[in-house]
Image: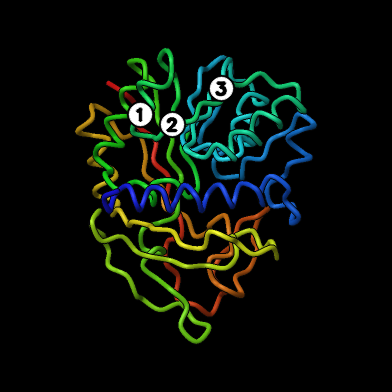
Amino acid sequence: MDEFEEFYEANRQNWNNRAELHSSDETGRYRIARVLAGGSSLHEIEAREIGDIAGKDIAHLQCHIGLDTLSLKHLGARSVTGLDFSATALKAARSFAAQAGTEARFVEASVYDARQALEGDFDLVFVTWGTIIWIDDIFRWGRVVSSLLRPGGKVYLLDMHPQLGQFDIDEGWPKLRFPWKTRAADPIVFDLDYTYTGDPRPLTHRRFYELIHPLSDVINALVVAGMSVDFLNEHAVVAWEAFPGMEEVGEDLFALLPEHPKIPLSFSVGATKL
């Protein structure tokens, strides 16, 4: 096993472990009951920015336990297909779809294999929250996204801002620690005891690897893949409590306290295949 396979396998095991916890969510953060009742788990940002999706065929990359995938169907999509590399997550996703009575397809594969794994072309590729930090080649990711879309199809990406990814907690205060851009051969290594939802149950697969992609690389990855950027937005909120003591300013959206100098916490990009 080479180092890249080692990183990938460690992350897959970590996400299998998290999927076990998230699919029996004890914190309410995943809004399971709402989705099973035909509602939506989307946050205010993505629900507003994707606009009207009625009648669209949507591919949801890195779909995790599938709740947002099902939400897209509930919001009017013609078809939804979720893709993830975690078998545990997809088992939960299929169970949720059956419980909700919602038609959805879930496929186990690496993002890089999405074009081979998914049938047909799509009107929208949906990618949100905690996704591209696991991608070691953002330009390859851009080519995969573009390959999934029909001409005129769109990608919507919403994720943690790379500037937020540079910070860690030091004596209870965010401190700049990591570089603005990481190399695939030298990712950031984390060993955490708990998942991000606040669930008190400990992780058994604690180690995982992340990468930081600057906004310039994300945008250029889409442009060189034949896409036109429609918008780039930066947001002062993120969908988890990234630092202790953040304030909740919307449903499951967190901001830095007023006394803290502000940095962008998340960003969103919309782009259209030419």
For the point 38% across and 57% down, the residue is 210
Q: Quadrant of residue 266?
A: bottom left
| Most distant residue in the front direction | 1
Give coordinates of residue 155: x percent, y percent.
Answer: 40, 31
Give coordinates of residue 65: x percent, y percent.
Answer: 61, 39
Q: What's the mark number on residue 80?
A: 3
Secondary structure type for disc 2: loop
Secondary structure type for disc 1: helix
Q: Colour scheme of this structure image?
A: rainbow
| 147 to the left or right of 198 | left
Q: CA gap, disc 2 to disc 3?
A: 16 Å
Q: CA gap, disc 1 to disc 2?
A: 6 Å
For the point 51% across and 63% down, the residue is 206
Give coordinates of residue 201: x percent, y percent.
Answer: 69, 63
Q: What's the mark number on residue 19?
A: none
Q: Nearer the viewer, mark 2 or mark 3?
A: 2
Name which of mark 1 and mark 3 comes first in the sequence. 3
| Most distant residue in the bottom direction | 171
- Pointer 2 residue: 109
Residue situated in front as seen by the camera: 192 or 59: 192
For the point 57% across and 54% down, the residue is 239
- Pointer 1 residue: 113
Name which of mark 2 and mark 3 comes first in the sequence. 3
| 212 to the left or right of 205 | left
Q: Residues within 10 Å of mark 3 (few under 14, many from 20)?
A: many
In this picture, is 116 found above or below 90? above
Q: CA gap, disc 1 to disc 3?
A: 18 Å
| 205 to the left or right of 43 | left
Tag 3: residue type? Val
Are discs 1 and 2 less than 8 Å apart at CB? Answer: yes
Tag 2: residue type? Ala
For the point 77% across and 38% down, the residue is 34
